[in-house]
Image (tube, coloured by chain):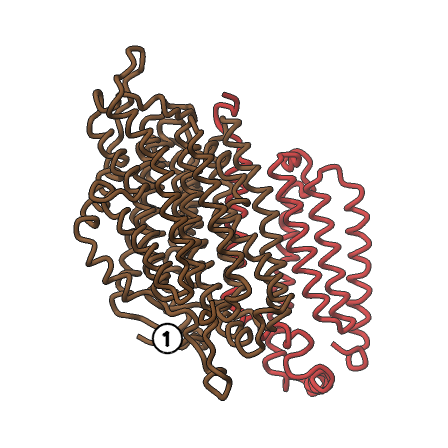
Chain colours: A brown, B red
Amino acid sequence: MLYDLAIPAQLTAALLPDLLLMGGAMCLMLLAAWKRDSAHHQRTVGYASLGLLTAVFGTVAWMALRHDATNTGGVIAVDGFRFLVDLVVLLGAAGTIALAIEHNDRDGITQAESHVLVLFAASGMMILAAARDLMVVFLGIEIMSVAVYVLAGLDRRSPRSAEASLKYFLLGAFATGFLLYGMALIYGATGETQLNRIGNAVGSLQLAKDPMFLVGCGLLLVGLGFKVAAAPFHMWAPDVYDGAPTPITAFMAASVKAAAFAAFLRIWFEGFYFGWAGWANATWWLAVVTMVVGNVVALQQKNIKRMLAYSSIVHSGYLLVAVTAASAFASTAFTFYVLAYTLATFGAFAVVATMQPAGTTDARIADYEGLWHVRPWLATAMGVYLLALLGFPVFGGIGFFAKWYLVQAALASPSRLSALAVILVVTSVISAGYYLQVVRAMFMQPRPADAPAPPAAGVLTRTVMVVTAALILALGLFPSQLVAITKDNGFRPYPFSPALQMGLPQMDPLANK
Amino acid sequence: MRHEFFPLFYSFHFYLFGLLAIASALLFVTRKSPVAAAMWLVNVMFCLAAEYVLLGAQFIGAIQVLVYAGAIMVVFLFVVMLLNLGHAEAVTDLRGNAGRLAAGFVGLAMLAEVMVLAQSEFAAELTPKAALARQAAEAIDGPGGVIGPIAAPLFREHLLAFELTSMLLLTAIVGAVVIGKKREGGDAR
């Protein structure tokens, strides 16, 4: 179905899954407020949220299978890229709620609204995946962020959770200032907020060297770099990831990042494509600094949550390679990578949540020593997730193909980013240092005699682990299906060129690099 | 509403809202309960908005309601109630059934007035004088009135952004409640 977004009814139809999620979340908000907070009510709302997410997932899949589309104008996009990112985000939200139901039970968190906030954040993420207008991008980012600020501080009895929430909120508000100022300057330089019109203006007005446009790009880069935790804007990430309840940490590390990157990619590919010569150096260096800093600091971590936080920073660096490559192939590699990363991250944090003693946020790597001898399946699952994050062949399943695909995208880009691809591979090798350290501790060291037995995982947590591990391995053995799906649903950078077709010279900004 | 057509109606309402505003302002500074004081301040804002509309500045009137009475005062009340400073039940200004009846009567009277005005708006031929006033207003401000040029793009081109903003505000409110709500069993670990 082809939508004409100028007609309100069709705009509504194009936003069907988003509206379903928002409306359902509001109903669940009323359900959550209906009764006093209790462990039982928290579980009820949690299960209802999972049901809602399933319905939305089905709607998105249905629209994707119908190959719904829209023309290139309008405030939102209806394309395969949006639907794929939506599905990944919904998977993440469902994983978060599944983990949170049991984690809340164990830590005595009874606010039923916590699940509703996850749904609100997910709706903001879906808006981000669709946004084709800077205003909508901003609102999507804020709906997502405001909900996550609160979620980080959910554990009201933990001072570290409160610290995480406040730190994230203050720094996030600061980053929002950069984002808005950047958008204002872009509007000043192009006179537009819709991405296709910005794209036309950047091409026809030759803005690649325009100071106002470039400063706007730079400020936008700072704002989005904060949201995706790219170095040097990553300082908040380890403290916030460490202090927040573990399911929320997984949500922040996987879904928030995926959604923010989706908007990042769309703005840069559709809006700023013809400014490539101006901004490519900035994203190139941002990618390199993020990869190097994240990896080097991750090597020194003793706490597994902080280690995974730095690992998530590193993965931002890898994804920035896709942004720099600026090609249809890069968008394909991006969706593939984001799915692999989301699966591995949720699996790893499910294990971390299980291993944490109730009521603490401590998660030392030393606790994992000899895990193989007491809980072999748990250790095996964690091994799969870490190897997937590392990008190890066969045992890391889909993770290897994700990274390989990303390197291919960098090399196949018209600008031939071979140096960036080399740095990606070298830093991946460095990352073996900390991923394999945990694997070594689990499999090759004896269990200390005084170590307490790890608590048993709940049914939902176990489901999350089994599903993620199975998907990682199965898609790793048969990746061609997924490759075909992502290939069909990549999006061409700068898909619209009415202004350029009308007499203006066709130019390829990547040709001279 | 142009006063050259309805001088009595105009001056009656102008002084009525002026006096109401002054009375509400006095009540605002003399109340003991912060919630009651804030409510009276909201009332001042509403009366001022009515004055602006009578002066022909409809847009400022609408913004007065939206920004001052709507946004700022509601946030103010929200903070007062969240921090539990209000104790509204202890120092309520409406005592007994007589007060409630009076409040209900005033509410119904205002509703009736709005209904009558809305009807005369849609059937402007009801009185020739009203139709004349309407034509004069349209000659000056255009068909949508003063607010039209702002309202039309807001609810057409930027409809999605507008609705998303309300979603953002709802998220923020739910978040504030989740963070601010008192825990049963205490907060300290």
* B2 to A254, vertically: above or below: below
Q: Which residue is mark 1?
A: A3
Q: Is residue A259 visible?
A: no
Q: Is residue B8 above or below residue B23?
A: below
Instruction: Please provide percent x and percent y for residue A35.
Output: 41, 38
Q: Name the residue type under label 1.
A: Tyr
* Side of B2 relative to A501 (left or right): right
Q: Position of residue B104 (x, y in %)?
A: 61, 54
Out of B18 and A77, give the one closest to the viewer: A77
- Please state the horizontal and vertical placement of residue A185, each as a whole percent of the image: 63, 64
Quarter of the figure that contains the N terminus of chain A: bottom left
Secondary structure beneath label 1: strand
Residue at x 50% of width, y 36% of height: A240
Query: Residue placed at 45% from the left, 59% from the top?
Result: A324
In front: A491, or A129?
A491
The reply, left or right, for residue A513 in relation to residue B130 is left
> In the displayed structure, does residue A412 sit left or right of residue A209?
left
Q: At x 66% / y 73%, what residue is drawn?
A: B147
Q: Residue furthest top?
A: A450
Q: Nearer the viewer, residue B19 or A285?
A: A285
Percent x, y for residue B31?
Answer: 76, 40
Q: Which chain is mark 1 on? A: A
Front in this rendered view, residue A238 or A54 = A238
Look at 24% across and 59% down and name the residue there: A483
Observer able to see residue A200: yes
- Residue B55: name its quadrant: bottom right
Please rate how many residues cluster around mark 1, counting C-alpha atoms within 10 Å: few if below 14, some from 14 to 19, many from 20: some
